[in-house]
């Protein structure tokens, strides 16, 4: 279980205080696919960076499996981070390394044996549908294929938490359907908790169990997807529904 309690974060920009997260409280159950949606600047990416400990809040806590993640240090922090997979917006692949080396990178950092790496990476190539692309470099792959490499890399260490930052924002409609289907398959096969940051209602409707709507750093509503989307209470949710993309 993930418990986000009174999370607050601000930045300074040109002498002005920008509140990115404003007393955010959420509970995410183990194994859920949880969507966090909002317009640009709502605080979604800041929340994701806090969940991955790439950003620390000004106040509040995130407790995952009874551990306050901002109290971790040294080996405990490294162990926690190895148990999280992150699929960044824009893929963040190593352009000078082929697909096999990109996916195996976290396993090499963990110093797994060559045999373990070969077995795990081969399994992931098959699972994400990239057979035959082991030696291909990112520049020779389509956007959907790059996303599959990024997803396989995030899964390499068998994480219990998988974070997606706008996983379909750069993809066409057909590829978006394929990636969303893959996310569902990940949930079923690996029983991993998945958090998806997105501005697309279609993504939430197609794959998420629950959703939280952020606006200017605040959670304006949250709950089971069908209940929130069929009976929106906030103006920002109604606006997002009005901009819904058909997927």
Image (spheres, rainbow, N blue to C red):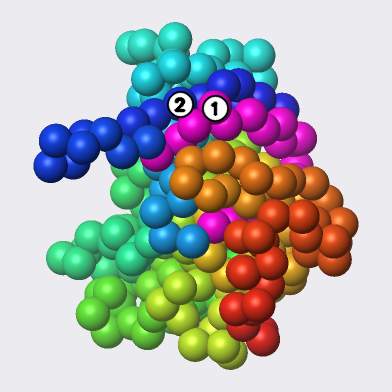
Q: Could you tell me which residue is drawn at 25 percent across and 75 percent down?
A: 137
Q: Is 26 colored magenta in this rendering?
A: yes
Q: Earlier in the sequence, mark 2 or mark 1?
A: 2
Q: Is 102 colored magenta in this rendering?
A: no
Residue 156 visible somewhere in the drawing: no
Q: Is residue 38 above or below residue 79?
A: below
> What is the CA distance from the residue labelled 2 to the residue labelled 1?
5 Å
The reply to whether callout 2 and callout 1 are in contact (CB within 8 Å) is yes
Residue named by callout 2: 8
Left or right, 110 with respect to 181, comes to left
Left or right, 239 with respect to 17, comes to right
Q: Residue furthest left?
A: 14
User: Where are the magenta residues, as a range?
Assistant: 20-38
| Residue 86 screen position, x and y as percent | 45, 48
Residue named by callout 1: 23
Q: Pointer 1: residues within 10 angstroms few (<14), some, or many (20+)?
A: some
């Amino acid at each position: 279980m993930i418990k986000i309690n009174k999370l607050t974060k601000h930045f300074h920009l040109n002498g002005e205080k920008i509140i990115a997260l404003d007393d955010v409280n959420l509970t995410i159950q183990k194994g859920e696919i949880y969507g966090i949606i909002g317009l640009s600047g709502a605080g979604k990416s800041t929340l994701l960076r806090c969940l991955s400990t790439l950003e620390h809040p000004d106040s509040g806590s995130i407790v995952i499996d009874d551990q306050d993640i901002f109290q971790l240090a040294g080996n405990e922090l490294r162990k926690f981070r190895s148990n999280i997979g992150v699929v960044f917006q824009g893929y963040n692949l190593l352009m000078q390394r082929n697909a096999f080396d990109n996916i195996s990178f976290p396993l090499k950092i963990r110093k797994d044996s060559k045999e373990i790496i070969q077995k795990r990476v081969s399994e992931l190539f098959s699972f994400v549908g990239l057979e035959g692309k082991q030696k291909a470099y990112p520049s020779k792959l389509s956007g959907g294929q790059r996303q599959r490499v990024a997803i396989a890399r995030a899964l390499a260490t068998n994480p219990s938490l998988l974070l997606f930052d706008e996983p379909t924002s750069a993809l066409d409609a057909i590829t978006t359907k394929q990636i969303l289907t893959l996310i569902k398959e990940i949930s079923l096969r690996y029983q991993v908790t998945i958090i998806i940051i997105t501005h697309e209602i279609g993504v939430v409707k197609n794959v998420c169990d629950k959703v939280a709507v952020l606006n200017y750093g605040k959670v304006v509503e949250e709950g089971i997807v069908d209940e929130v989307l069929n009976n929106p209470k906030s103006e920002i949710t109604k606006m997002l529904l009005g901009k819904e993309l058909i997927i």
